Every structure is written in structure tokens, then in C-alpha cells.
Image (cartoon, rainbow, N blue to C red):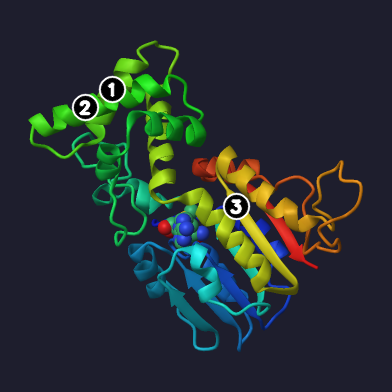
Amino acid sequence: MTNYHEPVLLGEVMGFWLKQNPGTYVDCTTGGGGHSAAMLAQLQPGSTLHCLDRDADALAFAADILKSDSVNVVFHHNAFAELASCVAPASVDGILYDLGVSSHQLDERTRGFTLNGSTQALDLRMDQRESKSAQEWLQETDVATMAHVFRANADMDRAFPLARKIKDQLLVAAEEVLPFNVGHLRAAVDSIFRDRRFDQNSLMARVLQAIRMDINQEMPQIETSLRAAVEALLPGGRLCVISYHSVEDRTVKVTMAEYELDCICPPRSPMCMCGGNRRKVKKLLRKPGLPSAEELKKNPRSRSAKLRVYEKV
Ligand SMILES: C[S@@+](CC[C@H](N)C(=O)[O-])C[C@H]1O[C@@H](n2cnc3c(N)ncnc32)[C@H](O)[C@@H]1O
């Protein structure tokens, strides 16, 4: 465990993993290196651990703690959609995704993800090399598109009036000669959801999540990367994915479902047109793994975590 981020479902992931030892493993979401450190402690000499993250802060932190004389640790400052350029096809024994954002990203004010305080500018980029910050995204995105993003990514009611109010608040920020900040967003959310039955903090968190998912293209990233992961795994290799909300979990489930079937023709198709025999993975958990009561108590941020595990056939 580090202050940077407490790894979630650690024992459960490790229980499914490191079956081929020595071997080649990939942590697609290295973050504070909690999962990677546990892997490193168990990997035999001669193994390789590839650590990816699109966030330079995360990789710098992880590189400091993930040191080994016997295991080859390779850091990649890449988005995981670029997995295919980091590892060769059919060369990997295990791949982990611990999706979403780290506690460091959420808590560190300079990253512009946090709800604490009110004057810090909204940023929400995981990779600072990406050009569009939250402020630029809000300026450039029209009201209808913004409302669609709120509905699709966070299931928000009153999405259209909220998007319009945010546009008003962008003008307020410009008049104040300030960057658009958490206070401006809160003012927009407060004016649309005045009723007491709404929990303002959870609404704010959902709006931020919706914007963040679009800015970082999180769902397309997951889909592209899972497809590359299936190709990268050796037969018997394992894929563990931890998701934190329903849109993420659905993306994982739907993308992987295609690889669990021999035939992907429409159910009413009179004969198989896809060639059949396409199955590439089997599910190792019938129902997703959830944090134990003990973990929930120790780390409340684990409360929405769901683990799905697949094996390449
Ligand atoms: C929940 S944290 C991982 C925490 C890590 N398992 C640990 O134990 O510290 C998620 C990490 O994934 C990274 N990330 C999210 N989406 C990514 C993507 N598409 N490509 C690469 N890294 C990504 C984030 O920058 C963040 O550092």
C-alpha cells in the first residue's frame, strides 16, 4: 500500500495470476504501483513485467518503487490502447487493468480532478501531453453534445439544462478573468438540481466523471485495448479487469463476450456465416468478484469495484 493509491482486490487478482512463472506480465494501469509491487514480489527471476500508464506522474512514482535485480521491469508511457505496440502477439502470461483514476489523481489539486476546494481550474486529463483540458472541452463542445455525454457516461437527468447552465458559467468565468473552476461547475449543478433529494457531491462527481470519460476517451480505450490483450495473451494466459462503474463494466463485458463464443452470427441466422470456432477466451468467474467487507471498511473507494477474469483458450 502507498499513499498514492491503495490497490483494490489485490488478493483476488493475485490468486488468479502468476500461473506461468517465470513469465511475461503486463500492468496496463500501473498508477501508484500497488498491484505491480505485489507481482514483482512473486515473480521468479527471468520474468518480465511491463508497466503502462498514460500519466507521467504515476510512472515516475512507480519507477521509484518498482525495482528488481532479477525481474526485467519495463515502463511504457503509453495509453493502454497502444498495448499492441508495447508487447508482441501471443507473448504474455497475464494482463491486468485496474480502470479509472488513482487516489493521487483525485486528491492532487494541481491535476484538476478534485472536488475539494473551489478555485482550482478543471483539467481532467490523465495524460498532460493531450491537448484538451476540461475547460477547453467545455468551451468547444456544443450544448447538445455535452448533454449527450452527461446522459451516456453518467446517466444524468436534466442533462440539457445543465449543459446550458455550464455554458452560462463559462461566460461568468470569462467576465471574472478566471479559469473555469470547480466553483463555476458547482454553481451550474446547484442551480439545476436545487431539490434537497439530490446529493450535490455525488452529482458533481458524476458530472466530472462524464467529462473525464469523454476527454480521455476512456471507453474506446478499453475496447481497443481488450482486443489487443486477447491477441497478446499466450494460451492459458489470464486477463484480470477491475472496473468501477456500470458503463465501464458493460464495456468490458460486451467487448469480451464476442471472444467467448464460437459463432457470432445473429441468433436467427439459418447457417453460420462467421466461420465458427472463434472462441478465444473463457470466463473464470461466473459472477464478478467484489471487495470483501474487510476491504470495504479499510478502503471505502473500493466499494464499486468489480473484477472480471478471463483465460485465453
Ligand atoms: C485505479 S489507478 C491504478 C492503480 C494501481 N493499480 C495501483 O495499485 O496503484 C488507474 C491508473 O490507470 C491509468 N489509466 C487510466 N486509463 C488509462 C489508459 N487508457 N491508458 C493507460 N493508463 C491509464 C491512470 O492514469 C491511473 O494511474
In space, the residues marked 3 and 2 are separated at their CA atoms by 36 Å
x, y (%) of residue 77?
40, 70
Q: Is residue 237 visible?
A: yes
Left or right placement of residue 142 versus residue 40 in this view: left
Q: Element under label 3? A: strand
Mark found first going from the N terminus, 1 or 3:
1
Q: Amino acid at mark 2?
A: Gln
Name the foreground residue: 259 vs 313. 259
User: Which quarter of the figure has residue 5?
Assistant: bottom left
Disc sitting over residue 14 in the figure? none
Q: Is residue 303 visible?
A: no
Q: Mark 2 sits on what residue?
A: 169
In space, the residues marked 1 and 2 are separated at their CA atoms by 6 Å
Q: Mark 1 sits on what residue?
A: 165
Does the closest atom of ligand 1 sit within 8 Å of the Cβ of label 1? no
| Residue at image location 35% in from the left, 70% down from the top | 60
x, y (%) of residue 154?
49, 33
Q: Element under label 1? A: helix
Q: Nearer the viewer, mark 3 or mark 2?
A: 2
| Residue at image location 28% in from the left, 56% down from the top | 131
Q: Residue lying farthest right?
A: 270
Q: Amino acid at mark 1?
A: Lys
Q: Element under label 2? A: helix
Left or right placement of residue 21 versus residue 66 in this view: right
- In the rendered view, tell whether residue 234 sits above or below residue 292: below
Q: Mark 3 sits on what residue?
A: 242
